[in-house]
Image: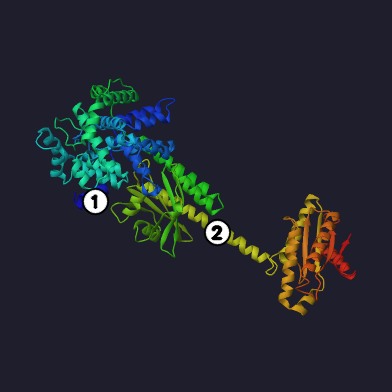
């Protein structure tokens, strides 16, 4: 395949259309009372498009799995029921037929039956041959011909020529396809399997199910992959022989010849294989509430019960969705505005985008200006797959284009494969994503990437505008909280004593007034303690002002350690401290003062080696509010000052009370 043709497929095709039969059955299941997840899983397993989509999602580089997932049951278990439900609802609501009505050249019901039958036969063969992962053989059979649908999606008219030439039985299908498209369906299927990160064995089986075994081995295909390709080839042939080819024509499928030991084994157990196939197809019929005996009447039974194509969404439904979106937008903004912490604001924003605006994945990246990159910080999505988001990042201007544009223009940007964002899109496993900057103080604080990787919902200008508004509100909320926080910090600095970090005199007196008013209103006790460091001047004169500063800080620390959170501690003067004791009667305040005095005396003994010529003790004055409403602040402070003076007059290192 030419590089141009390869790039065209890689850029324009994100998956396959779901079978209308499966879509209809899933819709019915959603309406059935008591329908369980197991029933949904069994329906999904019959469809090529849904199986491919689920494998593509779990194997995307974003999840960084050590080993690729090669069975549908494992993939579904990893995604979880919530994510699977989102995928199904998305297929139902947003799927569009990539080939306009009237231009289809492949009968989708017939093709679905062929893919499903080939899958069932391949799994049955693998059971009898002892292939280690039979479910992988099932998937290989289900997906082996997906390239035909992709070719039709690319050019319906050209594939009409393929169908016409097939009916003439002149050339094999791959030859006709290659003549018209420059590649046949196995090559296209293999290319897209690699692009969608499917396991290598599946990719090889899809790519080489028409390649002769000797040629495949010459290309270096490993034994397991070549065996799987041979199993698919044989299953494809059996399906065709029973009238269930991928298209309704009599041309024998081009196939590689399985090794002789496989042919011999198949011949010896063919009857057992077909018994298993018939049992499985009868079970498929039960899923769709149809009765079939197996492969022989499978096509006829299903043909008689084709579902009617369900109509798309009405204008009224679209309008209702828009109204719901506006309501959800308002709700998110209200929630953001009432929060105070930055992390809660951003978490609420992301959760709102996911839960209320209906996006499947929201990833927050922090901006690292020093390294010119964005680094993953947090994520919200519907899957149950763990991801170390801190290891996800993109170098700005090298790995991408759209993220840089969003940060530079400060506007949301839609990343598509038409730009230089293929690396980002391939990593996330999507065809489009919206990058929205988070601005704080008119500067880029980070960016979020938002996509609908499960539902496949197409992005509209209204979505982009709504996301921009939500992120703008979140950025403003963070900015406002930062301003409030800075204001509080400045206020605290204005109220603090720079040396000791306790309240300064102005704030201590202000709090004293407030506590006096509260005590008078509530008729509660209020005590006050005044502290003076004994012979403090001696520390300065003997050891210098740095020693004096050290003593002031250490005394302040011990006052804080002795006090309650509700107490107010302030530096009243040079070596004097004030402590307000709300809701504390005189007796308890005396106990507090004595405990503080003893603590300072003990600490003074500890630092005698540092200051051998000085002794650290304190004198303490204590008083309490005598009569609520009958005392002014000046009188209150005057009485505690008098008590302190008495302690100093009586020899220091003691507590005195003014009663």
Q: Which residue is tagged 2?
A: 482
Vertical arrangement, residue 242 with respect to residue 361, above or below: above
Give the residue number, with chain letter if any, for mark 1. 7
**Which one is in front, 475 or 389?**
389
Q: Residue 457 vs residue 586: left or right?
A: left
Q: Nearer the viewer, residue 508 or 251?
A: 251
Measured from the top left, where is residue 221 in percent x and y? Answer: 25, 45
Residue 102 at what x, y percent from top left? 19, 34
For residue 419, which numbered disc appears in the image?
Answer: none
Q: Position of residue 349 (x, y in %)?
A: 48, 49
Q: CA distance from mark 2 to mark 1?
A: 48 Å
- The image quadrant that residue 599 belongs to is bottom right
Q: Report the residue at 40% width, 25% height from top.
A: 32
Q: Residue at x 53, y 54 (%)?
A: 342
Sequence-first tag of 2 and 1: 1
Q: How is the image coloured?
A: rainbow
Image quarter of the C terminus: bottom right
Please tell me which residue is depicted at 21% across the width and 52% down the height of the picture: 3
Residue 460: x %, y % from top left? 35, 46
Q: Nearer the viewer, mark 2 or mark 1?
A: 1
């Amino acid at each position: 395949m030419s590089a141009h043709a390869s790039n065209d497929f890689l850029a324009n095709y994100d998956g396959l259309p779901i079978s209308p039969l499966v879509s209809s059955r899933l819709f019915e299941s959603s309406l059935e009372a008591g329908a369980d997840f197991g029933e949904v899983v069994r329906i999904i397993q019959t469809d090529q498009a849904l199986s491919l989509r689920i494998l593509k999602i779990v194997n995307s580089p974003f999840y960084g799995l050590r080993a690729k997932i090669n069975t549908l049951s494992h993939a579904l278990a990893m995604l979880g029921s919530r994510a699977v439900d989102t995928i199904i609802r998305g297929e139902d609501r947003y799927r569009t037929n990539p080939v306009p009505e009237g231009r289809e050249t492949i009968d989708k019901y017939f093709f679905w039956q062929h893919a499903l039958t080939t899958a069932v036969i391949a799994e049955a063969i693998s059971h009898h041959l002892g292939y280690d992962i039979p479910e992988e053989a099932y998937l290989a059979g289900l997906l082996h011909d997906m390239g035909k649908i992709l070719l039709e999606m690319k050019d319906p008219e050209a594939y009409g020529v393929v169908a016409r030439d097939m009916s003439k039985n002149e050339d094999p299908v791959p030859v006709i396809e290659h003549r018209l498209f420059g590649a046949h369906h196995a090559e296209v299927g293999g290319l897209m399997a690699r692009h969608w990160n499917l396991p290598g064995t599946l990719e090889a089986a899809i790519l080489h199910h028409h390649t002769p075994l000797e040629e495949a081995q010459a290309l270096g295909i490993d034994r397991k992959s070549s065996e799987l390709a041979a199993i698919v080839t044989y299953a494809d042939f059996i399906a065709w022989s029973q009238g269930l080819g991928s298209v309704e024509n009599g041309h024998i499928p081009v196939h590689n010849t399985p090794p002789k030991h496989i042919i011999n084994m198949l011949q010896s157990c063919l009857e057992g294989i077909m018994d298993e196939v018939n049992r499985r197809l009868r079970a498929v019929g039960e899923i769709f509430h149809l009765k079939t005996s197996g492969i022989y009447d499978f096509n006829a039974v299903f043909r008689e019960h084709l579902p009617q194509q369900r109509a798309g969404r009405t204008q009224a439904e679209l309008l209702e969705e828009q109204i719901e979106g506006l309501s959800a937008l308002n709700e998110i903004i209200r929630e953001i505005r009432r929060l105070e912490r930055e992390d809660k604001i951003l978490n609420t924003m992301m959760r709102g985008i996911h839960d209320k605006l209906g996006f499947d994945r929201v990833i927050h990246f922090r901006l690292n200006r020093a390294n010119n990159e964005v680094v993953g910080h947090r994520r919200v999505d519907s899957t149950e797959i763990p991801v170390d988001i801190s290891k996800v990042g993109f170098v700005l201007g090298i790995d991408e284009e759209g993220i840089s544009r969003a940060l530079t223009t400060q506007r949301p940007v839609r990343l598509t494969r038409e730009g230089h964002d293929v690396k980002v899109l391939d990593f996330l496993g999507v065809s489009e994503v919206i990058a929205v900057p988070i601005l704080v103080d008119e500067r880029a604080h980070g960016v979020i990437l938002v996509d609908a990787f499960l539902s496949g919902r197409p992005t509209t200008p209204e979505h982009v505008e709504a996301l921009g508004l939500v992120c703008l509100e979140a950025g403003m909320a963070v900015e406002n909280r930062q301003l409030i926080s800075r204001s509080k910090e400045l206020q605290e600095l204005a109220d603090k004593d720079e040396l000791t970090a306790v309240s300064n005199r102005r704030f201590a007196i202000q709090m004293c007034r407030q506590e006096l008013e509260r005590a008078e209103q509530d008729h509660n006790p209020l005590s006050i303690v005044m502290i003076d460091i004994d012979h403090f001047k001696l520390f300065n004169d003997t050891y210098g002002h740095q020693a004096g500063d050290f003593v002031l800080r250490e005394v302040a620390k011990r006052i804080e350690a002795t006090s309650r959170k509700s107490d107010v501690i302030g530096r009243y003067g040079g070596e004097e401290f004030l402590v307000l004791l709300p809701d504390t009667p005189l007796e308890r305040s005396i106990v507090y003062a004595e405990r503080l005095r003893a603590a300072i005396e003990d600490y003074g003994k500890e630092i005698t080696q540092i200051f051998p010529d000085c002794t650290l003790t304190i004198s303490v004055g204590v008083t309490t509010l005598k009569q609520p409403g009958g005392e002014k602040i000046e009188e209150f402070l005057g009485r505690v000052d008098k008590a302190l003076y008495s302690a100093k007059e009586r020899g220091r290192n003691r507590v005195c009370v003014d009663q």
